[in-house]
Amino acid sequence: MNNDFLIRFCDVSFRYESDNETPLPLAIKNINIDIKKGEFVAILGHNGSGKSTIAKLSNAIILPETGKIFVDGMDTADENLEYEIRQKVGVVFQNPDNQIVATIVEEDVAFGPENLGIEPKEIRQRVDDALKAVGMYEYRLHEPHKLSGGQKQRVAIAGVMAMQTDCIVLDEPTAMLDPKGREEVMKSLLRLNREMGKTVILITHYMDEAVKADRVIVMNGGNVVLDGTPKEVFAHEDVIENAGLELPDSAKLALMLKKKGVNLPDGILTPDEFIEGFKFSVSGGALN
Amino acid sequence: MIKDITIGQYFPGESFIHRLDARAKLIVVFLALVEIFLCKNFLSLALIVLFAVVSVAISKISFKVVFKGMKMIYFIIVLTSVLQIFYNDSGTVLLDWWKIKITTGGIFTAVFMAIRIITLILVSSLLTYTTSPTTLTDGISRLLSPLNKIKVPVDTLAMMMTIALRFIPTLIEEIDKIMNAQKARGADLDSGNLVQRAKALVPIFIPLFVNSFRRAYELAFAMECRCYNGNNKRTRMKQMKFSWRDAVAFVVIAVMLAGIILLNYFFGAVI
Ligand SMILES: Nc1ncnc2c1ncn2[C@@H]1O[C@H](COP(=O)(O)OP(=O)(O)OP(=O)(O)O)[C@@H](O)[C@H]1O
Ligand SMILES: [Mg+2]
């Protein structure tokens, strides 16, 4: 067992239980994913491609039909390890409404650490830190049902952050956020990853978020179709389109310009890279 | 309209009442409720009304909010009072017509009952207005913790209560949403006889039930994810500590008890 891997999916297949005789098709088809400690991984895929299913598999909420999943070397199928696994991997689900347990924001954020038996003082510290990190500190005494969708989303993220797990899996955490909120959440995730060394798995529909990750995994119909650095993954325009996705805006623009004969370098993904490339090509063009 | 219900709601604050320990508050409120029933004449009743009104004033929760919250209960108050008028036939007769007989005794009792119920609600809603539901359930579970010894799962029951409280507003919102969605599709919910109206409610409650099960399922996942399993030793962020405030509250409620007994004794019972 290689100890550098935090989460390993080994030939994992999974299907949801059907309400009638005919079994449902596989939601996850024989996938292999190894996630290293400290990695920032983005998972992309169209609706129903199996992203949320991966999130649930990663901390023993559901178990694979065939294959094995290991979290820090622990088999998720082993019931005795459930508690330890969940101390390693925290999951923020898609719908914030159904994850908030308590009737006051700060009490909800405290729920996880309380379950772990942390000292009251330490819990207070963690709760305040987590709420500040997601920009919800002023709302700590509010009732969750009176918050907007995006605010609830942030509380749900804080709730998992306060558990201080080694790895955080977030299922479309920014889906309900406005651009500014998205940026803030993205920033705090990057900080968690870069400064505190946490492993982050971000399930998203936003390409500009995926570009900031160390690694991008593209799902299509329960299969992993691409897995690599953003540069490697977004070089496969055809596969991306086949998976029902689009390239990041800057990459799209660069590609369009290149087709029109503008001389731009390959692998442009972000606005900054685009500007650099464009400057280079304009100055180069002037020299010619 | 459905959202106007404020009973059971919590209004955060920093007042003396807010800062009482939840356990102390529960005991004091319980004693106050007992005292309300001990009142036998208008003087002792006035004393407890004074206590309730002063408590609300100290809590800095506006009387408007408190009385708005009672709206749903006015009906019950009026009904009990009216029943008292007809039921009780002591004192001088004021009106005697056909089978209806109204007496001074009846009116006294009716007024007495009305004040009693209003005070009852005032005191008990002050409890929920000034204590967060989580703290409240925490307090209850601490008070009941001796029951753990006879294998009553107090903590689990407290968790169930917290979740119920947490989801009541969510479900109310959902009912509103579904009703509007059905109305938008042309459902007629407000007219017809009782049977027709009851039938019109079926398409509201079916989606509500289906959604509730889905919610419960997802919530269970989320709770498991956050390491809840119903039997681990949980710590709490907010420690409960008795302070001088709680002592003051106990003294006040004890003095009240003595006062009520004395007033009852010296001025006789009218009820
Ligand atoms: N509880 C369930 N019961 C039955 N089938 C399910 C259930 N949840 C998901 N599925 C099916 O499993 C497949 C994968 O679903 P999953 O939720 O993982 O998709 P997703 O990639 O997260 O999609 P989205 O982008 O919409 O969130 C889908 O075909 C879906 O219909
Ligand atoms: Mg999903």
Image (cartoon, grey):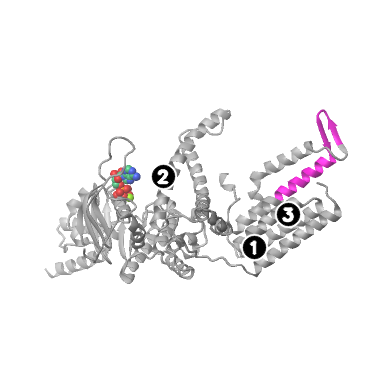
Secondary structure type for disc 2: helix
Residue A264 at x, y percent in the picture: 17, 63
Image position of A113 (left or right of B247): left
The kind of residue tagged 2 is Arg
- Name the chain under label 2: B
Crowding at label 1, few (<14), some or many (≥20) Cα neighbours within 10 Å? many
Per the model, the C-alpha gap separating discs 1 and 3 is 19 Å
Per the model, the C-alpha gap separating discs 2 and 3 is 45 Å
Which residue position is annotated with label 1? Answer: B17
| Residue contact between numbered discs 1 and 3, judged by CB atoms under 8 Å | no
Which residue is more in the foreground, A220 or A254?
Answer: A220
Residue drawn 57% across and 60% down? B12
> First in sequence: mark 1 or mark 2?
1
Chain part drawn in magenta: B94-118
Residue A120 at x, y percent in the picture: 48, 68
Image position of A111 (left or right of A34): right
**On screen, residue A138 above or below B165:** below
Residue B207 at x, y percent in the picture: 45, 39
Residue, far front: B150
Crowding at label 3, few (<14), some or many (≥20) Cα neighbours within 10 Å? many
- Place residue B246 in its image quadrant: bottom right
Mark seen at residue B35: 3
Which residue position is annotated with label 2? Answer: B214
- Name the chain under label 3: B
| Residue contact between numbered discs 1 and 2, judged by CB atoms under 8 Å | no
Crowding at label 2, few (<14), some or many (≥20) Cα neighbours within 10 Å? few
Residue drawn 59% across and 48% down? B5
Identify the image quadrant of the N terminus of chain B.
top right
Secondary structure type for disc 3: helix
